[in-house]
C-alpha cells in the first residue's frame, strides 16, 4: 500500500473480451512477488505492462490499477473501496487512459504500428503541410473508452488525463488541452459541429474547465446525463459505476441526492423510451432502475431537448415527504427538502386514506403507518418509498397526439413512443397536459390513470404541477412516467387559478403510496 502523499499515476482502461487478471485470495501471493506482473507472464494484460512502462518513463514510481489494487473476491472491501474512488483519482498526479477496446490489445501508440490512421504530410518547395485528424477532439462514437460507463468517474474525477487513442495522444487538465497536431490552451474554443460527435467532446473538455465553479446540484445533473449515455455490461453495477461521482458531491439514496431528493425525482425519459428498459436491480423511481442506452438523462429545460431527464429549474413547492423502509420495518425520512402546502388547504383534499374517514387533517406531515406484513415480507423492501401524496385519476387519451412538434422529425416513424392527452375525467375539453408513453404500454392499460403531485412550479406566468404517473399492483406501485400539468383552457385569465381549478375538478385526495 502507498500513502496518498506519494505521487502516483492511475490507469483507466476497457476490459473487453478475454481472461481477466484480478486480485483475489488465490492470486495475491503471485501478484505481490517481485516480477508478478512481468511481461513474461502470459496472464499479465498487455495494457498493464505498457502502462507501467509509460508511468516509469514519466517518472512515477507507483501506478494504481483497480483490478489488482482492489480485492475482487471480497464484496465488503470492494464496497469500501468504491467509496474512495473520488479520492483515488483526484489524488493521482495523472490518469493514463488506454482507448483500446480490450485490456489485452495494448495501449495505442506504445508499440510501432499500433495506431490508425497514419497522419498524412506533404512537403513542397516552400511549405510543409501536415493533416489534422478527424476533428479537434476525440470522437466519442469511435472511442471504446468514452462509451464505457465505468470509465466515466475516472474521467471526471481525475485532475489530468493522458488519453492514448488510435489517432494520437491527448492531454487534458482543468486549464488546457494538448494534442499532437494541435495546441489549444485558450479557455475559449470555437468548434463548428460537423455531425461526427466531436462537438460533444468539446463540450466535455470545456465543462472540465469550469466544474470547480459550477453549483453542485447542476454538476450532479450534468454528470448524470453524460453517465447514463454510456454502456454498462452488468445492469447491477449502475450505481457502483457512478459511486465515486456521488461520493464526491453529497449523500444520496439509490443515486439521487438526499437534499434535493424531490427535485431529482422529476427526471423523465427522452423521446425514446424503447431504449429505456427496466432494470429490476433497483427501484423504478430512480434513474438506476432503467437502462437508457444512448438516450441518457439530464436535468433542466436549459439543455437541448436531446436530453432525457427534466428537473424543474424554478423553486417549486414540495408536497411529498419521502420515507425509506429500513430492514426492521422502521421508516426513516429520506429528504431534507423544504415542505410546504401553501396552495392546498384542507378544503382542497381533506381526507387521508387509512385514518378515520371524514376526519380532516391540516397536512400529511405525519409519517406513514407501519408497512403491513405483506409488504415487509416482500424481497427488496429497502427499495420502497412510502409517503402521503395528493393525486387523482385522470383520463389519458387512447389516440396519440399528432406528431407536429419539430422534435418528432428526429425519430423514425416506427419509434414506439407517442404523446397522449391528459384531461379531467368526464370533461375531455378540460385538458391538463400530455404525457409521453410507450405505445404498447398505453394499449395494455385503461384510460383512467393515477397521477400524484411531486412538486408545484409556482412561477406566475407558468404555474404547473409536476406529477408522476404510477401503476398499482396490489399495495405496491411502480413509476411509469412524469408529466407537467398546466391547464390550457378555462374562463379565468389567471393561469394559477385556471390550473388549480381544473385540477380540483379531478377530485384529488391524499393517498398513502408505497412506491417500488
Image (cartoon, rainbow, N blue to C red):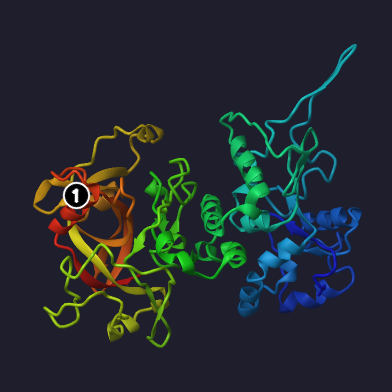
Q: Is residue 109 above or below residue 345?
A: above
Q: Nearer the viewer, residue 404 or 415?
A: 404
Residue 9: image location, x then y, percent: 80, 60
Residue 226: image location, x then y, percent: 55, 50
Q: Secondary structure at mark 1?
A: helix
Q: Tell which residue pokes out farthest to the top in this image.
A: 125
Q: Tell which residue pokes out farthest to the left in this image.
A: 426
Q: On the picture, is 56 further left or further right than 400?
A: right
Q: How many marks?
A: 1
Give residue 79's quadrant in the image. bottom right
Instruction: Give the residue drawn at x 17%, y 72%.
Output: 350
**Quadrant where the N terminus lies?**
bottom right
Residue 122: image location, x then y, percent: 83, 19
Q: On the picture, is 483 further left or further right than 97?
A: left
Q: On the picture, is 241 further left or further right than 95?
A: left
Q: Is residue 4 above or below residue 435?
A: below
Q: Nearer the viewer, residue 324 or 313?
A: 313
Q: Is residue 132 above or below residue 420?
A: above
**Quadrant where the C terminus lies?**
bottom left
Instruction: Give the residue drawn at x 81%, y 72%.
Output: 31
Q: Nearer the viewer, residue 353 or 216?
A: 216
Residue 209: image location, x then y, percent: 68, 47
How packed is label 1: few (under 14 Cα within 10 Å), some, or many (20 or more)? some
Q: Which residue is mark 1?
A: 498
- Please indicate, yes or no, whether residue 420 appears anywhere in the rendered image: yes
Q: Nearer the viewer, residue 392 or 316?
A: 316
- Please indicate, yes or no, whether residue 15 appears anywhere in the rendered image: no
Amino acid at each position: 500500500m502507498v500513502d496518498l502523499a506519494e505521487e502516483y499515476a492511475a490507469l483507466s482502461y476497457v476490459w473487453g473480451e478475454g481472461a481477466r487478471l484480478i486480485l483475489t485470495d488465490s492470486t495475491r501471493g503471485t501478484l505481490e512477488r517481485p516480477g508478478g506482473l512481468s511481461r513474461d507472464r502470459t496472464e499479465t494484460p498487455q495494457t498493464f505492462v505498457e502502462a507501467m512502462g509509460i508511468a516509469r518513463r514519466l517518472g512515477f514510481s507507483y501506478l494504481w490499477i483497480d483490478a489488482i489494487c482492489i480485492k475482487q473476491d471480497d464484496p465488503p472491501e470492494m464496497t469500501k473501496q468504491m467509496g474512495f474512488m473520488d479520492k483515488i483519482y483526484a489524488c493521482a498526479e495523472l490518469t493514463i487512459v488506454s482507448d483500446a477496446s480490450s485490456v489485452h490489445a495494448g495501449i495505442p501508440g506504445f508499440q510501432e504500428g499500433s495506431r490508425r490512421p497514419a497522419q498524412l504530410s506533404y512537403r513542397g518547395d516552400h511549405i510543409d503541410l501536415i493533416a489534422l485528424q478527424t476533428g479537434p477532439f476525440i470522437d466519442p462514437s469511435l472511442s471504446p473508452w468514452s462509451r464505457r460507463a465505468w470509465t466515466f468517474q475516472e474521467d471526471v474525477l481525475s485532475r489530468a488525463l493522458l488519453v492514448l487513442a488510435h489517432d494520437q495522444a491527448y492531454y487534458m487538465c482543468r486549464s488546457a488541452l494538448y494534442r499532437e497536431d494541435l495546441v489549444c490552451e485558450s479557455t475559449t474554443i470555437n468548434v463548428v459541429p460537423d455531425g461526427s460527435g466531436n462537438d460533444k467532446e468539446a463540450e466535455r473538455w470545456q465543462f472540465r474547465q469550469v466544474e470547480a465553479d459550477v453549483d453542485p446540484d447542476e454538476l450532479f445533473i450534468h454528470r448524470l446525463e453524460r453517465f447514463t449515455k454510456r454502456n454498462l455490461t452488468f445492469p447491477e453495477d449502475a450505481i457502483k459505476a457512478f459511486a465515486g461521482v456521488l461520493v464526491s458531491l453529497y449523500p444520496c439514496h439509490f443515486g439521487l441526492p438526499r437534499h434535493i431528493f424531490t427535485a431529482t425525482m422529476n427526471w423523465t425519459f427522452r423521446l425514446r423510451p424503447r431504449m429505456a428498459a427496466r432494470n429490476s436491480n433497483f427501484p423504478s423511481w430512480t434513474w438506476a432502475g432503467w437502462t437508457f442506452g444512448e438516450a441518457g438523462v439530464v436535468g433542466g429545460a436549459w439543455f437541448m431537448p436531446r436530453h432525457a431527464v427534466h428537473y424543474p429549474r424554478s423553486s417549486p413547492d414540495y408536497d411529498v415527504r419521502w420515507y425509506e423502509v429500513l430492514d426492521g420495518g422502521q421508516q426513516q425520512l429520506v429528504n431534507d427538502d423544504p415542505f410546504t402546502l401553501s396552495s392546498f388547504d384542507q378544503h382542497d383534499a381533506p381526507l387521508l386514506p387509512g385514518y378515520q374517514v371524514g376526519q380532516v387533517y391540516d397536512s400529511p406531515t405525519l409519517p406513514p403507518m407501519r408497512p403491513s406484513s405483506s409488504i415487509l415480507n416482500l424481497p427488496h423492501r429497502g427499495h420502497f418509498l412510502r409517503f402521503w401524496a395528493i393525486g387523482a385519476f385522470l383520463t389519458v387519451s387512447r389516440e396519440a397526439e399528432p406528431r407536429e412538434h419539430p422534435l418528432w422529425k428526429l425519430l423514425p416513424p416506427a419509434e414506439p413512443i407517442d404523446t397522449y392527452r391528459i384531461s379531467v375525467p368526464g370533461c375531455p375539453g378540460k385538458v391538463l397536459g400530455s404525457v409521453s408513453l410507450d405505445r404498447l404500454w398505453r394499449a395494455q392499460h385503461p384510460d383512467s390513470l393515477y397521477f400524484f403531485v411531486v412538486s408545484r412550479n409556482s412561477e406566475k406566468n407558468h404555474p404547473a404541477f409536476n406529477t408522476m404517473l404510477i401503476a398499482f399492483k396490489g399495495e405496491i406501485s411502480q413509476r411509469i412516467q412524469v408529466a407537467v400539468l398546466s391547464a390550457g383552457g378555462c374562463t379565468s385569465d389567471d393561469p394559477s387559478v385556471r390550473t388549480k381549478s381544473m385540477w380540483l375538478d379531478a377530485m384529488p385526495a391524499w393517498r398513502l403510496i408505497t412506491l417500488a
